[in-house]
């Protein structure tokens, strides 16, 4: 390489280093956003979120903004944001080839983030609830149908789909269809919920008895005698409903889902490795096979004299973030019901990540090997170029920690029939030892005859 070419290479690499450093800057502080969110200062949370990211179409930003607006009773704004999130997610689901290629040699953060399956489903949960509060039942049912199509897409695309995130949205859809008097779609939704909850064993979410009772109740209402007898024999006959009563549907959300963190792992490249001995080219098949070899070496011990290079890579990881409050009871004086765990978002996040980790690990290690080979070649051209390439490798080695961070950790459902009228509801919250540690009251909750009253409630402890 000529001196002129070397100077030009150094300039180019220096610009790349600066660019990568600027890309790594977060447009907003999620810590500040969450503090304001916990304090109920939703305007401040949105201001912090928009500080440097206003107008951003990136998916995590849209997720956070939509949910915060929902809790700030800005239901129209929340729906507009979630609609953009849905469009963006659908558009990014099939990732561009160019971004995929770039991500192999730089950072996973340059890959299109389309959201996880459960995140995409939860868009429809919050949009449906927005429409409930706006008294737009037909639009709420549109969200149920969108969620149903998305569930079917997941099931058709993967015969091993484990319905992570699916059971809850199907259960809620059944309730909403019932509310609208659409018994047939409600029955179909409850059947989805039954199927999905029975595959939720790995998430630790027990099958809600009410799903079975709802199937029996609707089978009887629809005249499906054979199904009614089967469901009644399995789950018991549904309780009689008083004609002068209505139903309270309270969704209780607790805590925060764990956020992704970055974890560094070191893999030893040995002096006897063919990729070192032969100074191999960037043959994709060879590099991938070598990447698998390195992964098998994780946690193995080697003598220092055997090691050519210690390859450090960054991968995402989760740490459990269980809240203190994990139970709820509602008491009106004339009726009492305990909340039932219907969704464990932390478990869904962990399960999803566990299934994705082998692919993430291989892609990350392959990227690291390619960077290392690039460094070897650059070092042969000159020490300065080699150092710049090494610096570029370091600043571009960051894990993809993008996710929807304001989601709750778990969701509980309180479902109870109450006499029509106005009720004051005492809420009691318990910890893992079933000890009551907090109470609150919902004043003047109106229950209408043969109708449903929907509420959601969030704690952070």
Image (cartoon, helix red, strand yellow):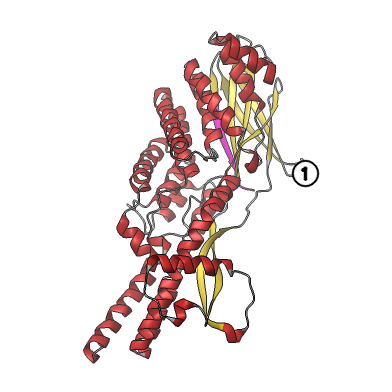
Residue situated furthest left in the rendering: 4
Local SS, label 1: loop
Q: Give above or below for 452 relative to 100.
A: above
**Residue 10 image-quadrant placement:** bottom left
The foreground one among 409 and 76 is 409
* Residue plotted at (48% across, 35% down): 125
The foreground one among 168 and 179 is 168
**Residue 127 image-quadrant placement:** top left
The overriding secondary structure of the stretch rendered in magenta is strand
Evaluate whether residue 245 shows in this view: no
**Residue 455 lies in the magenta stretch:** yes
Question: Percent x, y for residue 352?
Answer: 54, 48
Question: Percent x, y for residue 293?
Answer: 53, 68
Q: 342 left or right of 41? A: right
Evaluate whether residue 169 shows in this view: yes
Q: Give above or below for 98 relative to 397.
A: above
Q: Which residue is mark 1?
A: 433
Number of dots carrying numbers: 1
Q: Give above or below for 433 relative to 421.
A: below
Q: Give above or below for 364 relative to 345.
A: below
* Residue plotted at (48% across, 16% down): 184
**Residue 131 image-quadrant placement:** top left
The foreground one among 198 and 396 is 198
Question: Percent x, y for residue 306?
Answer: 58, 83
Q: 453 left or right of 301? A: left
Q: Residues within 10 Å of mark 1 (few under 14, many from 20)?
A: few
**Residue 258 lies in the magenta stretch:** no
* Residue plotted at (48% across, 21% down): 177
What is the magenta range? Answer: 454-461
Q: 11 left or right of 35? A: left
Image quarter hosting the N terminus: bottom left
Question: Percent x, y for residue 86?
Answer: 38, 41
């Amino acid at each position: 390489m000529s001196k002129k070419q070397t100077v030009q290479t150094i300039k180019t690499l220096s610009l790349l280093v600066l660019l990568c450093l600027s890309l790594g800057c977060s447009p907003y502080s999620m810590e500040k956003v969450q503090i304001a969110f916990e304090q109920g200062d939703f305007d401040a949370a949105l201001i912090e979120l928009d500080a440097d990211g206003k107008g951003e179409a990136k998916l995590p930003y849209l997720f956070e903004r939509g949910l915060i607006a929902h809790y700030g009773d800005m239901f129209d704004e929340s729906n507009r944001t979630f609609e953009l999130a849905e469009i963006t997610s659908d558009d990014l689901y099939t990732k561009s080839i160019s971004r995929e290629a770039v991500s192999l040699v730089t950072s996973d953060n340059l890959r299109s983030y389309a959201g996880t399956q459960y995140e995409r489903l939860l868009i429809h949960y919050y949009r449906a609830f927005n429409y409930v509060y706006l008294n737009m039942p037909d639009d709420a049912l549109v969200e149920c149908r969108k969620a149903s199509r998305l569930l079917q897409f997941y099931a058709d695309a993967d015969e091993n789909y484990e319905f992570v995130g699916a059971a809850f949205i199907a259960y809620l859809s059944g309730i909403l269809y019932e509310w609208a008097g659409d018994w047939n779609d409600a029955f179909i939704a409850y059947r989805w919920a039954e199927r999905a909850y029975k595959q939720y064993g790995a998430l630790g979410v027990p099958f809600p008895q009410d799903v079975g009772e709802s199937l029996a109740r609707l089978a009887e209402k629809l005249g499906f005698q054979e199904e009614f007898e089967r469901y009644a024999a399995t789950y018991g006959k549904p309780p009689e409903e008083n004609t002068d009563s209505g139903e309270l549907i309270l969704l209780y959300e607790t805590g925060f889902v764990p956020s992704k963190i970055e974890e560094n792992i070191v893999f030893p490249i040995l002096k006897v490795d063919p990729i070192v001995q032969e100074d191999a080219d960037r043959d994709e098949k060879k590099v991938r096979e070598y990447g698998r070899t390195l992964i098998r070496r994780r946690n193995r011990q080697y003598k220092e004299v055997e090691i050519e290079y210690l390859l450090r890579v960054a991968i995402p990881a989760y740490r459990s973030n269980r809240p203190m409050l994990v139970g709820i009871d509602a008491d009106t004086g004339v009726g009492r019901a305990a909340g039932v765990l219907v969704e464990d978002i932390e478990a869904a996040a962990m399960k999803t990540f566990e299934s994705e980790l082998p692919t993430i690990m291989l892609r990350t290690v392959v990227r690291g090997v390619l960077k290392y080979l690039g460094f070897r070649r650059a070092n042969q051209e000159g020490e300065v170029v080699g150092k710049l390439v090494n610096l570029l490798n370091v600043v571009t080695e960051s894990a993809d920690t993008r996710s929807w961070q304001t989601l709750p950790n778990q969701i509980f459902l309180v479902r109870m029939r109450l006499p029509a009228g106005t009720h004051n509801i005492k809420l009691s919250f318990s910890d893992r030892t079933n000890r009551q540690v907090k109470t609150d009251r919902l004043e003047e909750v109106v229950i209408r005859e043969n109708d449903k009253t929907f509420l959601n409630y969030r704690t952070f402890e």
